[in-house]
Image (cartoon, rainbow, N blue to C red):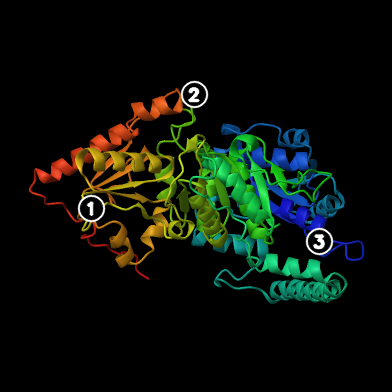
Amino acid sequence: MAIAAKHLGATYNTTDFPNIINSKTYVICGDGCLQEGISGEACSLAGHLGLGDLIVLYDDNHITIDGDTDLAFTEDVKMRYESYGWQVLVVDDVANGLDDLRAAIDEAKKCTDKPTLIKIRTEIGFGSPSKQGSASSHGAPLGVPEIEATKQRLYGCDPSKDFFVDEDVAAYYKEQADAGDQALAAWDADFAKYKEAHPDKAKELERRFNGEIPEGAFDDLPTFVFGKDKANATRKFSEACINAVAKKMPELMGGSADLTGSNCCQIKGAGDFQKDTPEGSTLRFGVREHAMAAICNGMFAYGGLRPFCATFLQFAGYALGALRCSALSKFGVIYIMTHDSIGLGEDGPTHQPVEMLESLRSMPNMCVVRAADANEMAAAYQIAINNVHTPTVICCTRGTVAPLEHSSRDKAMKGAYTVIEEEGEGAPDLVMIATGSEVWRCVDAAKALQSNHSIRTRVVSMPCQELFLEQSEEYRRSVLPGNVPTMSVEASAEHGWHRFSHAQIGITRFGMSGPLEQLFKKYGFDAENVASKGKELVDFYKNLGGNVPDLNCRPTFNNFQA
């Protein structure tokens, strides 16, 4: 959020209106928060960027759920944060008054070139006769007797009253609300003058904070012309798409976890966001995947920006907590994940995702798109930009994909479509479903099945399962009849494909180090094996008398009680 405020201030503040964007970001954290790895990632970057409007109030009570922090957390937090480049202030006592804390906050506000950590020594459960300073007051309610004793002992409150606010406390909060209303009115008056002096800036700022997509945002997305345009990796198509959209959507701001060249996510002409260049929109996250995704959540929450970030798909595992937060919070963050299968070469199994696609697809309110070519990649970006309240993971290949003659951006927007029709009349003999780099291999396999065995094969590209499941039953059946032998082909885990297919060509073990084509052949994703397994599936049901279970004839239950 502090990054968003600093960037937007540098973009929209003017010499005559220097405070249109002028906010401070406050964080309240505890001992456990500073033990989490993400605190090191995020705070290291904040120090590097000199985020002077970021103020963290650290509740230093020396207690976690298991007991005293001496069990596992004895580092010198002050020295740690000073080494990050933070200003660290210490408040030793808040039990006997808050003047020292208020003074520390005032001092923190004056520091404009580095973030501030205020280390506040507190005692957990303060005022509780039996539980003050103990872990028992951390993860469970104090209990009625203890609450009543605390009310009488510390605050002079009537112990018989629950959920009661004294008049003087209510009056103080009303004063603060009134002061906030006055500040808002003053800002509205300033913005009205700003609109007169800088109408274009004001209009753009309003559009961005209203979350409105500019007219023609998708007009420049590339269209692949079969037989003319060059085959390429889908990560290169992704690079072309993000640059096409960025021309009309300057709110796109983000970067990579130290893999910019590999992720192909650099917006041309976008300078770096650094301490001295806050107007830049390229973020250098460093090797900090978890913090990267969390920072994008904060930027989206602040408003006025559409954050994106990038890494290898396998490394989404480092950031899953923050990705889940994106989905839970309905933040339309755009995740660009390249090197999306075993087909990434000699990096080997540590870098080759197997379970990651299904892990992401199984997450509620998460849209996963694995494009097969340039047209489907254009659809991926249109889907991602339109998904204001749903994060989107755009999966990209490292290796080159063969061009598809009948791919379609519009059809890909439905999640799945027929990319190669079966020959002749009537239902197909076989349906193959694939995603990404496996689609063109299925096209080759389908041609071989037709020419060698007269097996009339339909090839379906399914870039996005979630969008396909949102389509009408009529459309879904038109693409996947359900009662025709159907085989899924994806260089990933088989899990999740059983609802769409009778048999699967997938991965049930970790990857290996080796050239792309050798690996794809070894794992059975070459056209020859795909065709062989397709024929085997057709023959299997022929031997059963042609009785093919209809995948669409299954009940779907909604068990959530609204």
Amino acid type indicated by mark 3? Tyr
Amino acid type indicated by mark 1? Pro
Q: Residue 122: give x, y in percent of width and height.
A: 69, 48
Determine whether 159 is above or below 443 in the image.
below
Residue at the spot x=51%, y=53% of the render?
A: 380
**On the image, numbered disc 1 is attached to which residue?**
428
Residue at the spot x=80%, y=75% of the render?
A: 188
Q: Secondary structure at mark 2?
A: loop
* Res 221 quadrant in image: bottom right
Q: Secondary structure at mark 1?
A: loop
Q: Which mark is residue 346?
A: 2
Q: Image check: 250 left or right of 496?
A: right
Q: Which mark is residue 108?
A: none
Quadrant housing the N terminus:
bottom right
Q: Nearer the viewer, mark 2 or mark 3?
A: 2
Quadrant housing the C terminus:
bottom left
**On the image, numbered disc 3 is attached to which residue?**
12
* Res 511 quadrant in image: top left
Q: Are marks 1 and 2 in contact (CB under 8 Å)?
A: no
Earlier-in-chain disc, 1 versus 2: 2
Q: Is residue 69 visible?
A: yes
Q: Are marks 2 and 3 in contact (CB under 8 Å)?
A: no
